Image (cartoon, grey):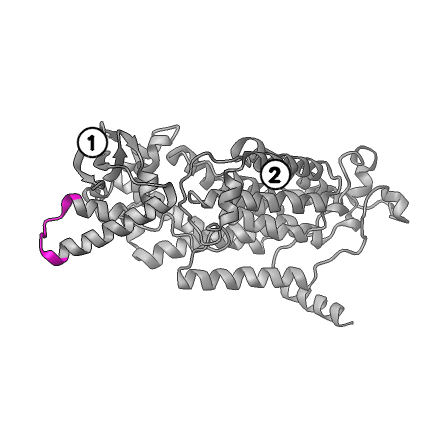
Amino acid sequence: MRAEQANDLARRLLRPFGISPITPLALAIFRTVLGLGLLYILLVYQPIVARADDVRRPHSPLADMQWVYALAVNKGATSVLQGVACVAAGLFTVGIFARPAYVVVVSLMLVNVLMILARAGGHDWGLPIVTLLILTVVPWSDAPSLFQLPRSWARFSAASLASRAYGFAVWLPGLTVGLALAAAAYAKVVGTGVQWITNGTVRYHFVEDGRNAPVTLGLWIATHPSVAIAVSLAAVLTEAGFILVIFARDWRTRLAFGLMGASMMAGFTLFQGVAWWPWRILFLAFLPWTLLTTLDKGTTIASSDDVSGSSFVAQRDLTWTHALLVVVLIAGQLWVSARAIEIEPFVSNYPMYAYTWSSTEEFDRHQSRTRFEADGKDISDRIEAAGGEDVLRQMVTRNDDSESNRDDIEEDRADFIARYTRIYGGVPPSIDVILLQRPFDWQRGRYLPPTRARIGTVHLAH
């Protein structure tokens, strides 16, 4: 009885949200398109493969574990994981052992994300992996397999079978995406006030990443400050307002929000060359799934024989588990944003594009990059992983020759050599410090030829 009371309380708590019921048919088709998206990620976008490089540059304390590094360089183990993940994704897509298969594929994707974070950032994965993990509560096996649909289409689309427990699958991405975008808008405003908008900050980010963009429209916007301000304002308003989708029940409203969010993703690709496929597949949830419902015309489900092969449960509804997940997500994001915490891949205050510059001149100064080379080979990743960037810069640019300053630098130098040796077995005899500059013509909207200047050479061998 207590469990039922808890479930009743949960349903009352979730009532204001637009969690619309969908049918087993709609859940089955959503499962199929989601599964195809997961297969695309595994086969094309980010397969589970061994990384040959030996750079250790953890972007999360959760990824800085020995088993992650060991797995990341083990070709045999990663091949097995890739094969298992693809088989599980295929089973999930067609609806065979759907829920266990889904747990397997998402768990292996999480392992892959940790291996990625051991070497690089994973902003394209933080929100999606959390969403996919939470979707393990969805009763995916209730929906018929693809093999059942041709002869049972009408039966599984009956309105009497629609459930909000199924609708939770297509509602949850609206909550997670909405919280992420709202957090991103908050990070911009709390960090710069209205300056992020009044500076037309999008133009700086378009120039920063525009070399990978398929079109030059972002560079045109960068050369028109008033247009950049308007686009910056639109970006913040879109991010801040997207969270309202969690209250939308009508499929037209949800579709409009989905198109708005998908347009932002398209903008990242067109103007910055950023294609975050794990985010993109979440927008499949905004399609009009409630339309896959037919009015009952005397069709009833008399026994389990009517849904042969399916584990259909006629009285599925939301439970205290759904309510707890929603409360934790909302309260957790509020706390994380207030404290500006980021622990990839699970929590983030989404500060990726929250910074700005006061002028194009300041932006140009910050576009200079320091590169470290040994025998003409770029070893910047190794230097960063060993924490040697600052000390190498100091050694080639130091102006203070006081004894205390020399002692400090020598101590930092010795620490760097020890770290580098521990990770890579030894340091190069000398390292060239190179300054790279990538100027941009703010009048004509085009990149100028990059420049390269050697600042100096640091000799490490005694």
For label 2, the SS is helix
Lower position in the chain sequence, tag 1 or tag 2: 2
Where's residue 111, x and y in %? 56, 45
Segment colored magenta: 396-404
Q: Give the residue at mark 1.
A: 452
Is residue 440 at all visible to an observer of this figure? yes
Q: What residue is drawn where x is 57% and y is 54%?
A: 246
> Which amino acid does the dot numbered 2 rest on?
Leu
Residue named by callout 2: 81
Type of amino acid at the residue the image marks with label 1: Arg
Q: Is residue 272 above or below residue 19?
A: above
Q: Secondary structure at mark 1?
A: strand
Q: Residue at x 39, y 50 (%)?
A: 236
Q: Nearer the viewer, residue 107 or 140?
A: 107
Above or below residue 311? Residue 325 is: below
CA separation in Å, label 1 and label 2:
43 Å
